[in-house]
Image (cartoon, rainbow, N blue to C red):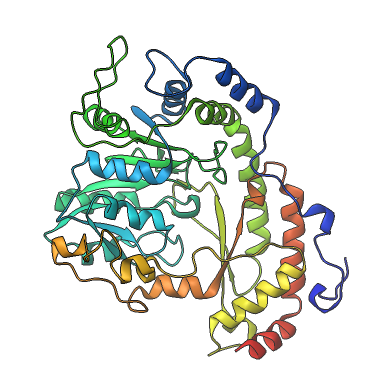
Amino acid sequence: MSSKLAALGGTPAVPKDRRHVQWPLVEDEDRKAVLDALDGARLVSDTDGVNPVSDLEHNWARRFGFAHCVAVSNGTAALSLALSALGVGPGDEVIVPALSFIATGLAPVHQMAVPVFADIDPVTFNIDPDDIERRITPRTRAIIPVHLHGAPADMDRITAIARKHGLAVVEDAAQAPGATHRGRPVGGIGDAGAFSLQVSKNIPTCGEGGLLVTGSTELAEAMRRGRQFGEVIEAGRDRDYISYGLGWNHKMNALQASFTSAQLARFDEYERRRQQNVTEFLARLAKLPGLQVPTALPDTTHVWHILRFRFDPAAFGLDGVRPQALRSALRRLLRAEGVPMSQYQLMPLPDQKVFVERLGFGSGHPWAVTGAPGTVSGEGYPVTRAVIADSLTIQKRHLNPGAGGLLSLYADAFEKVWAHKDMVATLTKAAS
């Protein structure tokens, strides 16, 4: 490998013919599962008897140890249905992290409730329990902790806070199937948990899909009614087309379910290999000064959906330099070496236009219902802002169970760039 940086004309650490890595892996068993579903007569979840959707619900619950599983159209629908089943609605506030995908903040709005944002932990990037407590008001009804990037949130403290204040907990486990907190699967620790099967996730479907899990029979029944127009669909009972409450059309179809069931059957082997690949990769990078690698709380299992790295300008002799400038320089140098560094979320959720300008349902709703103040762009959430400013991520490629060799090349690239700290400093100062 050339010691000259690729950005300056050297040979990249990652050859171009090694850079394309497929995810998800679509195997013959996935194709067969989808074709078998097409040849069947049960393409939707409201058909009587066993069907691919009910099979997936059973398989998911059995694999991860959940009492009830309800398949829905996507992860966002799962969050909204969970809040609806718990009775969250107009006049309520729901505490969510300031760093997450937009769906976490929109789910309360879909229920005419107000999202209240809390800052995050600087190491796990999950919601800060101390800031949760500071955000609680008499209107607070629920907390949505996100197991961001596959790292479990501090569920011991979050559930203790929820019990103290009589709040519901809906886990956003979209990025974390298989993650555990003190031996318990995430999603099954709070009142309800929501998973995403979107095609980029660790356990995907062939497009979009979601799953709800809960330990409550009553909640599971409410979720099933909610996904099907408020109707009650029971085996052996003719459909009566009566809506027993507010509902939506959030059903999953048989093709999505069949594809995910086939992927789920291979998850354990994929996860075993991913754990080995990623932990070896991070162990090499952890030796580099000024680089904070992903980590998790003690006694938890991180499933590494996204790998986020923070960079410290002081390690490059750049005290007082804006972290964004170092991030920009490292992104340029690492991408030139063949490492696909990117940002995940360009701003804190409270800076999103929909929340700043109260663009929910018009006339300032749902904020006007509670009298809650709107957010102000650029204010508050110092840890979230710092993490966004000084970090980059690796996404998708490492999910392929055969990516160990590629991750070794990525580590070579990091070590090569770090061997040119003076050049990194020069480029950073030029970008300041």
- Give how far across and how far down residue 74 sits, in percent: 43, 41
Tell me which residue sits at (49%, 64%) in the image: 345
Foreground: 335 or 293? Answer: 335
Residue 190 in view here: no
Foreground: 417 or 212? Answer: 212
- Give how far across and how far down residue 371 sits, in percent: 14, 67
- Give how far across and how far down residue 9 sits, in percent: 86, 76
Residue 184 vertical placement versus 370 (above, below): above
Residue 423 in view here: yes
Q: Say which quadrant the N terminus sits in.
A: bottom right
On screen, residue 266 versus residue 60, left or right, reads right
- Give how far across and how far down residue 335 sits, in percent: 72, 68
Which quadrant would residue 267 be assigned to in this image?
top right
Q: Say which quadrant the C terminus sits in.
A: bottom right
On screen, residue 324 versus residue 127, left or right, reads right
Residue 153 vertical placement versus 245 (above, below): below
Report the label total: 0
Tell me which residue sits at (64%, 58%) in the image: 283
Residue 420 vertical placement versus 308 (above, below): below
Seen as rendered, the residue at the extreme left is 138
Seen as rendered, the residue at the extreme top is 236
Tell me which residue sits at (84%, 54%) in the image: 17
Which quadrant would residue 192 be assigned to in this image?
top left
Foreground: 43 or 59? Answer: 43
